[in-house]
Amino acid sequence: MARPAIVLLSGGMDSATCLAIARQQGFSAHALSFRYGQRHAIELDAATAIAAALGAVEHRIIDIDLATFGGSALTSSDDVPKDRDDPAIGGGIPITYVPARNTIFLSYALAYAEVSGSRDIFIGVNAVDYSGYPDCRPPFIAAFQAAARLGTRLTDLTVRAPLQQMNKAEVIRRGMALGVDFGITSTCYDPSPTGRACGRCDACVLRARGFAEVGIGDPAQAAQR
Amino acid sequence: MARPAIVLLSGGMDSATCLAIARQQGFSAHALSFRYGQRHAIELDAATAIAAALGAVEHRIIDIDLATFGGSALTSSDDVPKDRDDPAIGGGIPITYVPARNTIFLSYALAYAEVSGSRDIFIGVNAVDYSGYPDCRPPFIAAFQAAARLGTRLTDLTVRAPLQQMNKAEVIRRGMALGVDFGITSTCYDPSPTGRACGRCDACVLRARGFAEVGIGDPAQAAQR
């Protein structure tokens, strides 16, 4: 019987690859997504499609109210920055940072882990993210794991971040090797109502660079033609 | 100008006393409560009254969906245990434990702290609680603080648990000295629809023992006569 694990699933390329890795490692995956007032709710449709395509045994979507607190371009009416030359390394914490988002996401994953008997939580943070977002950095992930072990019955819980050392191109290569269909993933911070990527926000720019580095076309763009 | 702080406020005696302590220490208090599928939603009315009585500058109530995960008598249809001889020390983690509850509560407090510019979070955990609930123990609180500092901009955040060394009678004495009206606090795990305490659940038993030890009547009981 496969061991259960919780996999945080946003609908983007990173968490899709993370789910594929969890499945490859033999875990039965309980996928967990959040409806948190993000402007790009279309990503939840992508998460649902990804969970099904990669054989998650369950996919739950939790409503959380981060917009109440404000403070981020992803959950407010502030403009998402576009056409930045260097989204990966510029200027500290970006305004698309959502306060304590990964702490909240991991806390829910912890509750889900405790109830489902899972001793593993997968999160798709990676080297590109943690240049700007403090809650994507390895020391934070380790510290959260320590707190989680002390605060629950799960004294041997492991928070796994298998993409932590990968850049976007490496994520793409790994995902493709595991059969991830990146055509159904959603990356853009500010898509059109029909789900078309803007092509200009930081997330779109990083995604395009990743595919360019790998030397292939983005299957999501092909699907939109 | 008073420094802002987040105070987790459940509507019970402990968090009410904790709020009074935060106010006494000169903080402007942003109170934070949760509607989390608890059977005793009447406690949120109590929290609102307490926030007003103790001069919180703001009181927010966040809807969270812990009942989705199940696993606790406080959020499910399982019976709340009653008439136990020794609720404080009996048999490990009680079934009224809600998985990862304080981790989730503190995560939201962290988001609120970051947005409001607070560098302090108050939580009313105490020595009685942490006999049974792992997420009330001092090592967990310290570990969460470490994770929070790494995962946000709040690198000097302090999670304060001023009741941590107090038993229930000490909480009552301290609260009374600070002018807390325990008549408006709500403790019972399984109150009647009109808010009358059952008098027999662990929380009621511990509350009654506290007042007996102090040698005064419970003002909430007097109000119900």
Image (spheres, coloured by chain):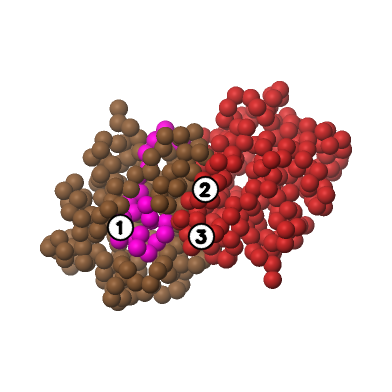
Chain colours: A brown, B red
Disc 3: which chain?
B
Q: Are marks 1 and 2 in contact (CB under 8 Å)?
A: no
Task: Give the image location of residue B71, x and y in percent.
Answer: 51, 34
Question: Which residue matches tag 2?
Answer: B144
> Residue A180 lies in magenta, yes or no?
no
Separation of residues labelled 1 and 2 (CA atoms)? 23 Å
The N terminus of chain A sits in image quarter: top left
Q: Name the amino acid, label 1.
A: Ala
Part of the protein shown in magenta = A114-138
Residue at 48% in and 51% down: B147
**Which one is in front in this view, the residue at disc 3 or the one at disc 2?**
3
Asked whether residue B191 appears in the rendered view, the answer is: no
Instruction: Specify the label residue B155 is tagged with.
Output: 3
User: Nearest the camera: A58 or A123?
Assistant: A123
Question: Which residue matches tag 1?
Answer: A127
Q: Name the amino acid, label 3.
A: Thr
Task: Give the image location of residue A10, x and y in percent.
Answer: 35, 54
Give the mark, 3 or 2, whose residue is nearer the N terminus. Answer: 2
Residue at 75% in and 61% down: B55
Task: Give the image location of residue A6, x and y in percent.
Answer: 37, 42
